[in-house]
Image (cartoon, helix red, strand yellow):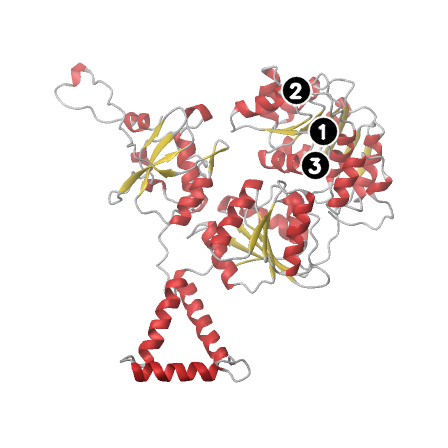
Amino acid sequence: MSNTQTGLSFNDMALPSAVLEQLNAMQFLTPTPIQLQAIPALLEGQDVLGEAQTGTGKTAAFGLPALAKIDASVKQTQVLVVTPTRELAIQVAEALEGFAAKMRGVGVATVYGGAPFGPQVKALKQGTAIVVGTPGRLIDLLNKNVLQLDGLKVGVLDEADEMLNMGFIEDIETILKAVPNTAQRALFSATMPNAIRKLAKTFLKDPLNIQIEAIAREKATIKQKAWKVQGMTKMTALTRLLEVTPYQRALIFVRTRQDTMDVAELLQRNGFKAAPLSGDLNQAQREQTVSQLRSGHIEILVGTDVVARGLDVPEITHVINYDLPSDTESYVHRIGRTGRAGRTGEAILFFRAKERHLLRHYERLTNAPVEFFEVPNANELSKYRQQQLLEKLQASLAPETASADKPKLEKLLGEWLEQSELSAEEIALALLAQHNEQRPLFLKEDRPVREARGERSERSGRNERSDRGDKRKPRAERGGRAADVDFETYKIQVGREHGARPGDIVGAIANEASMDSKYIGQIQLFDNHSLVQLPKGMPKDIVHVLKKARVRQQPMGLELSDEQVKRAPRPPRDRDARSGPKRSSGKGAARRFN
């Protein structure tokens, strides 16, 4: 959050004590210009029309006063926030959860398309106080009479112009008509096209019109670098990057709380001093973790946007965007964790082909270029390790750094040479072999991995396919299975009851493991699990990634299975075809995946 020298703090506003306590814990001290104007007006019950660019602190501007309106003893929806995208819905929900952490009985439900109705319906029926969602799913829930707005106190439209651009204007009108007249309304937008002004005039009552100029940012002392995800998994890239990067402290941003634990655990397994920083930690645990970072007991923190926003550790030299944020405001907050106290810093981001356009937004917002770079391949990392070992050995022999036990070691080496038939060269080779077992000096050549769909479509001129795969075509038309692959059967804890379809499973595996779909064999769905054929002898890090990957918001829990995928029985052929088989139309192949 930007600190604006206004002389007014959140403590000067009529916010609940639990909210103020949490803001102080998060080090949210000074309101931004839009917060200074919007929060008092919303607390007084006035409607607000806010025109402000991304990065000005809009979420807190409407979220904090909305929390003040909630009666935790009433189990019904009291605050509704409408966002254009699933990613922004998740981001806003996490922010509101963070602000409300000390408010007992106040929960947040996030509803969006592409996810099962069940958990979302359950949250709404339990009377969750805050609902954040996308237009399509909100209308579905309204039509099913699951989302009840009778007790709504605050309705917010966030990024209204983006919803207009995405064609949601009619959906928004439908939702606003369902908002009771007694509810307070707020509309926030980066721009104010005529359609949005008309919407505001129709549904807002004498609103306070707030216009905030885009924040002028000085050219940062933060160098921004970007790696396009290709050639290896993101986890492999992360471990290699951390190995060759001379960081003092590093902060890695991921999307969810579960990701903080998964990534931190994998880093620990690879010998890094890493720890998660998530909303699952209470304030005392969070402070202890940050203290360990400052002292050097921890060198890497893996966190989400919300919990890391108030983090101020001057020793952080690198910020790595393992997952890109859903909005540019969060990107600014992320990279602002480095380059503190007049120091220089480095911000690194991993992006996929379909996310390339976001880089231009980051450059404009930060007034600094984003440079592209490549993560070392296996051969380059091998040479790096060899050179590092050589330099370490040379340094240990220098007079100023020589071990105090050097005379004893020289004597021991002489005794070995006299007592054994080993030469000095053979002893050196044996020691190198032991080191190589602990930390390989000759890494296996990188396996060819799946090319991102966006890259294939860019070259061919075709539209990029959906992340779930082109399910309209049978596997044979998508290139078929690799003929020389030895498959084995894996079991995943996702099935029909979770709303999973084979295309979802293919998409999740292909994206998370960077695996070409031709290396994914047959899939068989059951009620509570599924079986999928994958290449035999997959690397442990990929198996671990897939174990934590999600399909329909459900962890896959990938593991080897004793069950075998059964081919679906062939449909009975037409009796007129007895003289010879009919030419396949591809429907049989498609049936195997349904």
Label 2 CA crowd tier, 10 Å (few <14, some 14–19, many 20+): some
Question: Which residue is the site of mark 2?
Answer: 174
Compared to 44, does 539 lie above or below? Answer: below
Q: Percent from the top left, x then y, of residue 428?
A: 36, 76
Q: Quadrant location of residue 567? A: top left
The circle drawn on residue 138 is none
Label 1 CA crowd tier, 10 Å (few <14, some 14–19, many 20+): many
Pick whichever of labels 1 and 3 is earlier in the sequence: 3
Pick whichever of labels 2 and 1 is earlier in the sequence: 1
In 3D space, how far apart are the residues under numbered discs 2 and 3 (Cα atoms)? 32 Å
Q: Percent from the top left, x then y, of residue 147?
A: 63, 19
Q: Percent from the top left, x then y, of residue 363?
A: 63, 53
Compared to 417, does 582 lie above or below? Answer: above
Question: Which residue is the site of mark 3?
Answer: 101
Identity, as a three-letter code, of the amino acid under mark 3: Ala
Question: Which residue is the site of mark 1?
Answer: 156
Q: Percent from the top left, x then y, of residue 442?
A: 36, 64
Q: Residue at x 59, y 20 (%)?
A: 141
Depth check, mark 2 against mark 3: the one in front is 3
Q: Residue at x 84, y 32 (%)?
A: 41
- Identify the element where label 1 is drawn: strand
Label 3 CA crowd tier, 10 Å (few <14, some 14–19, many 20+): many
